[in-house]
Amino acid sequence: VEPVSRISLRLPHDDHVWHLALAPAPKELDPDGGSLLVATADFDGLVRVWGYDRRAGELEPDGPLVLRGHGSKVRRVSFSPSARLLASASYDGTARVWDIVSGNAICVLNAGTGDEPVAVSHALFSPDEARLLTASNDRAEPLRLWDPASCEPLEIGEGTPAWDGRVQAAALDSDEN
């Protein structure tokens, strides 16, 4: 396999990074289309979004956009297909949807359905950005589907298997059903 390009970055953090995601920067942040966004899910409960200028081959000098709000370790981050939104899953029982352009949380999704503490291990967007799926260790509904525009839960539909335990990863396809 012949690599098309290579990226090697040193992203300074005070704690462990559990996961990272890459996406081309949205047009609002990079009209020329030469930058990548690198988001990290951190043990310290923060989400950091770094800009990487592919033309210069270096991180953008302003440092990362730091997204605060989670009360525990952030397990996973996932960009929407447009890269304008970022989802984060945390062991504080929530998933958050962030607007990358403004840096604000637009949704705080409580993934638990009962009184027991819940850890959210995954949050990801559908290819059309109309849905967000969360995976957690909630006994009643470990998989939950959300509308990221209204922050309201959606019905997953029939045929969803029942689990008694943690769902750590999931996938969505473009089928509307």
Image (cartoon, rainbow, N blue to C red):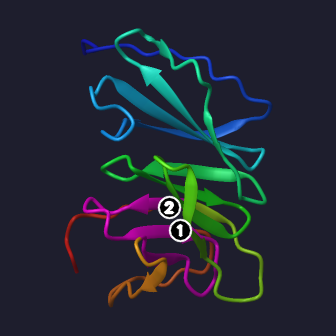
Q: Residue drawn 31% across and 22% down?
A: 34
Q: Earlier in the sequence, mark 2 or mark 1?
A: 2
Q: Residue furthest left?
A: 175
Q: Total of numbered circles in the picture?
A: 2
* Amino acid at dot 1: Ala
Residue 130 in the image, given as x and y percentages of width and height: 31, 69
Where does the N terminus fall, quadrant-wise? Answer: top left
Asked if disc 2 and disc 1 are in contact, CB closer than 8 Å, the reply is: yes
Classify residue 111 by image quadrant.
Answer: bottom right
* Secondary structure beneath label 2: strand
Q: What residue lies at 77% left-to-right and 82% top-to-bottom?
A: 116
Q: Which mark is residue 19?
A: none
Occupied quadrant, residue 129: bottom left
Q: Is residue 42 left or right of residue 37?
A: right
Residue marked by disc 2: 123
Q: Is residue 64 left or right of residue 174?
A: right
Q: Residues within 10 Å of mark 2 (few under 14, many from 20)?
A: many
Q: Which residue matches tag 1?
A: 135
In the image, what residue occupies the spot 69% across and 67% down?
119
- Please state the extent of the stretch shown in magenta in the rendering: 122-148
